[in-house]
Image: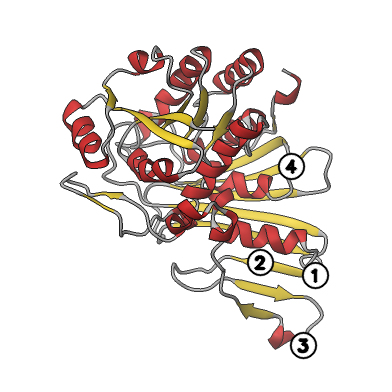
Amino acid sequence: MKINIAIVGLGFGAEFIPIYQRHPHTNMYAICQRNTEKLNEIGDAFGIEKRYSNIDDLLADPNVDAVHINSPIHNHAEQTLKALRAGKHVACTVPMATSVEECMEIVKTCNETGKKYMMMETVVYSREFLFVKELYEKGELGKIQFLKASHQQDMDGWPGYWPGLPPMHYATHCVGPVAGLLQLEAEYVSCFGSGTIREELIPHYNSPFAVESAHIKFKDSDLSAYVYRSLFDTARQYRESFEVYGSLKSFEWPLIEGEDPVIHTAKKPEPEIPERVKVPDFAHYLPAEIQSFTTQGVYNEEDNAHLSFIQGSGHGGSHPHMVHEFVSAIVEDRDPFPNAVQSANWTSVGILAHDSAMEGGKLKNLPDYGSL
């Protein structure tokens, strides 16, 4: 079975073209980009014949089975809904949407159309996450007691809608791993803002906070998680981290990029409790044709001058794993992970966390997306 894939948005989206070209169940059928010069450059580089500069024209093509959306955040919900209603399966980069109402609309539309939706959350397919998941499933961590995650970056100089963005409006990279490890559903959230960004950044979203930190309570579980985000005016090397504390072993992310993470083992002599570990690659989970993409990818140079296959794919080797999950869900006629309900829950944690911060930490209940 070959699924005809169309990619919308070719900045980050170009990373996925060679993966779909080599996956045994996909035909890299079409690309879509408003800038026709860039559209043709990438189409020529990868030998893709079908090219669209308008998403409506692409969605009208009956040969397109599934759409992978890599457009700017504010287009995600609108384009996802259009694609689902056009009868296409949808994979979409994070976050799912920018409002709880949009999340609800996408979940309802998936239910109505029967089409698959997967939010392409990189962290839950990173080698670190897969490593911790394997430890948990083998029983090595014992009972999970607490989960924690952060996503800190300096977004000064980023274009368009990024300046002044509330930190929690882009929170899925830290919400995904704490919810995803045990497939937990966030029930309610409380968040505090801390510090203040520069005066000229605040009016973009009427959001003053330099850092937002949230506690998430999970439904039908004794667990809660702590996540924090910063985007501007906070000194920190880029970090997407998650940490898991179990009764037998705990996993902690390194403080500095390039260092190894630490496993703490209970009941050892105190100096022996922590131990640095090498996280293995998980390419063996994948079809042979795409295994190489866990350690190398395609990288679109800033000046778009050329495409190179040799740069690191980043995101913890997650790109081929996400592609394989999306494609397998369609082939096997099952829900992908994360599905629409899970994606809506993770995205809404961030949206409602920011609302909570603006109201001084007020508890915010999440919608029950599974009942829509």
Q: Which residue is mark 2?
A: 251
The quadrant in which residue 139 appears is bottom right
User: Does residue 193 show up?
Assistant: no
Q: Secondary structure at mark 4?
A: loop
Q: Residue 240 location in percent, x, y?
A: 50, 55
Q: Which residue is mark 4?
A: 184
Q: Secondary structure at mark 2?
A: strand
**Classed neighbour count for the residue bearing mark 2: other residues with Cα under 10 Å, few (<14), some (14–19), many (≥20):** many
Q: Which residue is mark 3?
A: 269
Q: Amino acid at mark 1?
A: Leu
Q: Secondary structure at mark 1?
A: loop
Tags 2 and 4 touching, CB below 8 Å: no
**1 vs 3, front mark:** 1
Q: Distance between the Cα atoms at labels 2 and 3?
A: 18 Å
Look at the picture and state if 63 lies above or below 252.
above
Q: Distance between the Cα atoms at labels 4 and 1?
A: 21 Å
Look at the picture and state if 67 lies above or below 234.
above
Q: Amino acid at mark 4?
A: Leu
Q: Earlier in the sequence, mark 3 or mark 4?
A: 4
Q: Residue at x 43, y 22 (%)?
A: 64
Q: Amino acid at mark 3?
A: Pro
Q: Amino acid at mark 2?
A: Phe
